[in-house]
Amino acid sequence: GPTTAFYHDGIDSHLLAEAMSDEGIMARSGYFCVHYYLDHVKHYPPLIRLSLGMHNRQSDVDKFINAMKG
């Protein structure tokens, strides 16, 4: 789907979302609309959520990949 959520074992999701914002990448961090399930049932840390849409270009995807490599 056009929306994906993930986390990184070694980096706090809120800090990662802020760093992505500094690179011009729009992302959200947290548990979104399923806080209880993700936190208390699945025991996930806060997640990063990215959404792709008709407005995104390949260069946007490349920017995200390069930021995650750095």
Image (cartoon, rainbow, N blue to C red):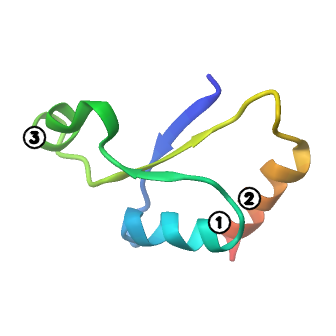
Q: Amino acid at mark 1?
A: Met
Callout 2 touching callout 1 (CB < 8 Å):
yes
Label 1 Cα neighbours within 10 Å, binned few <14 / some 14-19 / many ≥20:
few
Is 67 placed above or below 28 here? Answer: below
Label 3 Cα neighbours within 10 Å, binned few <14 / some 14-19 / many ≥20:
few
Q: Amino acid at mark 3?
A: His
Is 51 placed above or below 12 here? Answer: above
Q: Earlier in the sequence, mark 3 or mark 1?
A: 3
Relative placement, left or right, of 34 versus 48 is left
Tell me the distance, in whole angstroms, between the alpha carbons under discs 3 and 1.
Answer: 28 Å
State the image quarter where residue 67 is shown: bottom right
Residue in the image at 39% along x and 72% along y: 10
Classify mark 2: helix, strand or loop. helix
Q: Earlier in the sequence, mark 3 or mark 2?
A: 3
Q: Quadrant of the N terminus?
A: top right
Residue located beneath label 1 in the image: 68
Residue located beneath label 3 in the image: 40
Callout 3 touching callout 2 (CB < 8 Å):
no
Tell me the distance, in whole angstroms, between the alpha carbons under discs 2 and 1.
Answer: 5 Å
Q: Position of residue 36 (x, y in %)?
A: 14, 35
Residue in the image at 56% along x and 52% along y: 27
> Residue 65, labelled with which disc?
2
Label 2 Cα neighbours within 10 Å, binned few <14 / some 14-19 / many ≥20:
few
Q: Position of residue 57 (x, y in %)?
A: 88, 41
Tell me the distance, in whole angstroms, between the alpha carbons under discs 3 and 2.
Answer: 30 Å
Q: Position of residue 15 (x, y in %)?
A: 43, 72
Residue in the image at 70% along x and 35% along y: 52
Residue in the image at 77% along x and 66% along y: 66
